[in-house]
Image: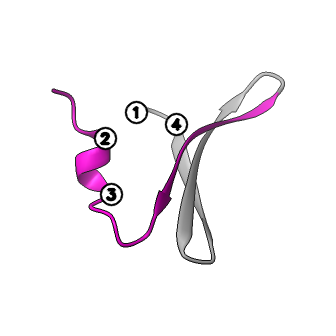
Amino acid sequence: MTGLRSFPVSRYILFYELVTDGIALVPVLHNARDIPSQFESE
């Protein structure tokens, strides 16, 4: 995903993209998950 950003909050990582009106949250994931696998295309 192009333009994807992240921000850690406690045990979670918030992923978001900048949009015209602000931000759009994509997924919110627990930091113990396999993060790269969550963004792989099938």
Q: Nearer the viewer, mark 4 or mark 3?
A: 3
The circle on residue 39 is 2
The residue sitting at 30% across, 45% down in the picture is: 38
- Residue annotated with mark 4: 3
Element type at mark 1: loop
Rate crowding at label 1 as few (under 14), some (14 to 19) or many (20 or more) other CA atoms within 10 Å.
few
Which residue type does callout 4 highlight? Gly
Q: Position of residue 14 (x, y in %)?
A: 59, 55
- CA gap between label 1 and label 4 equals 6 Å
Which residue type does callout 1 highlight? Met
- Residue annotated with mark 1: 1
Q: Is residue 9 above or below residue 23?
A: below
Q: Position of residue 41 (x, y in %)?
A: 21, 29
Rate crowding at label 3 as few (under 14), some (14 to 19) or many (20 or more) other CA atoms within 10 Å.
few
- CA gap between label 4 and label 3 equals 16 Å
- CA gap between label 1 and label 2 equals 8 Å
| Quadrant of the rendered image containing residue 1 | top left
Asked if the residues shown at circle 1 and circle 2 are in contact, with their CB atoms under 8 angstroms apart, the answer is yes
Residue, far bottom:
10
Element type at mark 3: loop
The circle on residue 35 is 3
Which residue type does callout 2 highlight? Phe
The circle on residue 28 is none
| Quadrant of the rendered image containing residue 17 | top right
Side of 33 relative to 21 (left or right): left
Q: Which of marks 3 and 1 is in front?
A: 3
Among the two numbered marks 4 and 2 on one chain, the one whose residue lies closer to the N terminus: 4
- CA gap between label 4 and label 2 equals 13 Å
Pick the residue in front: 26 or 17: 26
